[in-house]
Image (cartoon, rainbow, N blue to C red):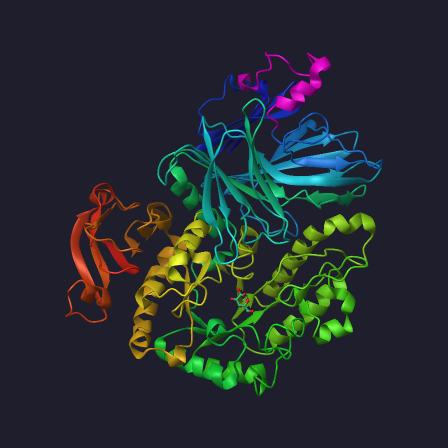
Amino acid sequence: MIKYVQEQQLFHLMTPNTSYVMALADGEWLGHLYYGPKLDDTTGMENAFRLNEFPFSPKVNERDKVRFMQGFPFEYSFYGTGDYRESCLGAENAHGQRGVELTYRSHSVIAGKVVPEGLPHTRGCEDCCDTLDLLMADDVLGLDVHLLYTVYKDLDVIVKSVRVVNRGEGPCTLTRVLSGQLNADPDSAEVLTLHGSWGRERTITRQRLETGSVSAESLRGVSSAEDSPFLAVLSEGTTQTTGDVWGMSLIYSGNFLAKAQIDQIGQLRCVIGIHPEYFAWPLAPGESFQSPEAALVYSDEGLGKMTRTYHDLYRNHLIEKRWLTQDRPVLVNNWEATMMNFNTDVLIGFARSAKEAGIDMLVMDDGWFGHRDDDTSSLGDWFVDEHKLEGGLKRLVDEVNAMGLKFGLWVEPEMVCEDSELFRAHPDWRFSLQGRKPGALRQQYVLDITRPEVWDGVYSQIKAVLSSANIAYVKWDMNRYLTDVGSLEREPSCQGQLLHRYVLAVYRMQAQLLKDFPDLLLENCSSGGARFDAGMLFYSPQIWTSDDTDAIERLSIQEGTALVFPVSTMGAHVSVVPNQQTGRVVPFNTRAKVAMAGTFGYEMDIRNMDPEEKAQIPGQVAQFRKIHPVNREGDYYRIASFRENHTYDCWMVVKKDRSLAYMTYVQVLAQPNRPGVRVRMQGLDPDAMYEVTCDYDGAMAARNGESSIGPQTTRSLGCFNGGTLMKAGIIVPRVRGDYQALLYEVTKTEG
Ligand code: GLA
């Protein structure tokens, strides 16, 4: 609900449990007053602007206007006229001079959402949200700035974006347009970011913020493995269940900046949006620029509640609706098993074994096109290598389909290798800087798909290959960061648009793909999880989380990823041991239990597996099929973190109606003389009775001295009251051996 209080010139945005308050100072400066637990009444709140204190407002004290600009808690800040903190809007006039001053003009409330054209966005009907369009302006530059706030009625979320319109007579250049700002006011703050690298994506990083600033950012052209477009401010000591949390998540897949900063008078400002570095957007009269959306969440019940709010937002209002209820196929992918060394017979062998094991889909990874036997060639040539796939793609797919399996395909449309027909025909299609040979990475270069002929040239090939056979799934990869971002055909003044235009071109291509193939399941990927962001989720309901498939490494990668992104979006597969990235040997059962936390599949040569392990696959698939709907639609609770306790990891998913839950416990390190661990569940109905069963791995039992059971068994622990399970918890038995996983099923009993 959006309320305007005329006497106070105050805007009160209300979600079920939160209030977001802004007001005008002197009738023109838009300031931020509050974001926190819901308020019943806002009377007197504008006192917090301290307008009765020196330096007063410019109307009272024009002599010290700049002092006012330095300290006023602007709702949407601007650069060049006295606010020296990290600001949201910057612009350069036709004389090359920089400076903006935004004041209030008008506002209106729209039922439903304003859709940002060409960008991924949250969705919302007239019944589920309202949007406040707050018009600010700079008359000297001739800029109208629409601050858009979508307020959801059933979710504690506010989605912000900004549209800048040049209604003046001359051109100007936008030098920064961030999506929004958050002015939190904790007594003492910590900042949480999801920092990482290739193979260690989205590791939760917390640091105390006393002075200065902390940021997460990418200048790599994609959201990156190194930082995620997310930042949260926490009151000190926040846990999963206690403390104040303010989260900002950007729905964008390119360069970004998320920054928290304490200013000179102790106020905390956070901004998030497209990274202003190397961004310059000329805006001719009549043109407009739309920023990506940022989703803000406040929780007064710790990180867990923030997580569940983001999960609900992204599942219900961002990802294509059908994926909330539609099952994802269990797949086998040939990459780790064969790399590029395969042919039709090998893949048919995979499909046959997959069918026996109850798997739904075969995915053919990199190496099927051009003459690609290694990474030196063929990106850009999206036609089948008939030497490998004798008889073509259709023959293979038809044969796989005839076995009752779906078929999926890997592509990397944004790239080109020098050794390719595409490059030989169009050497000028890659990004490059005048007079400089672009740098290769993994022997490949980035195509300038911002140019229509390049976009068409690539997309027409992809469309043709997908039309040639029955392809149910596409893994869209992107295996290098951007360098040499120059477009030979663009005006010098437009080069600063390229990084954003590139992202828009990717979005347009994925949108077109889904339009042309509406039943397709798209999984994004970028050297593992380097483009795992809310922008990509708009197009693909799942994203490959990391090339690190080691189940123990995955604990922290998946914990960090699931802090913001729904668990049903995390691509996760069982792979061989010793693990290809770490050399670690983790039991098959544990590898499966960890992969079941996301989408599920196998990334190994299932033709030549240990027969005992192979025999376990149908059971694992059946187990995943039980957990999957709860993962997909239910609530996620982080119970314990190996990252923090250095011993074990534990998480839970609970059906929305609280009738069924699954809790996964992974003992990472065994310790001597240690009793069973007490684990308190979460999210259950405190008044209901639940039966708790535990899935127990036979090998684990044998190590505990119980040799008589088979490879997998289920034990009932009996019935418990939900409140008791949450307050007193259960004792997870001590298990001998490292890397052991236990899965608990918690089912509400009748009556
Ligand atoms: C990336 C992906 C892998 C695989 C390879 C193929 O690294 O993350 O899963 O598809 O590319 O080259």
Q: Residue 624: image x %, image y %?
A: 35, 64
Say above or below: 561 vs 179.
below
Judge by depth and name the residue closer to the eye, 676 or 514. 676
The part of the chain drawn in magenta is 47-74
Q: How many marks?
A: 0
Quadrant field for ligand 1? bottom right
Say above or below: 567 vs 305.
below
Judge by depth and name the residue closer to the eye, 672 or 468. 672
Q: Residue 233: image x %, image y %?
A: 48, 36
Residue 254 shows up from this direction:
yes
- Residue at image location 49% in from the left, 54% down from the top: 201
Judge by depth and name the residue closer to the eye, 538 or 525. 525
Judge by depth and name the residue closer to the eye, 743 or 453. 743
- Residue at image location 79% in from the left, 33% down from the top: 141
Verify whether residue 71 appears in magenta: yes
Q: Residue 240: image x %, image y %?
A: 37, 41
Say above or below: 63 vs 644.
above
Q: Residue 294: image x %, image y %?
A: 57, 42
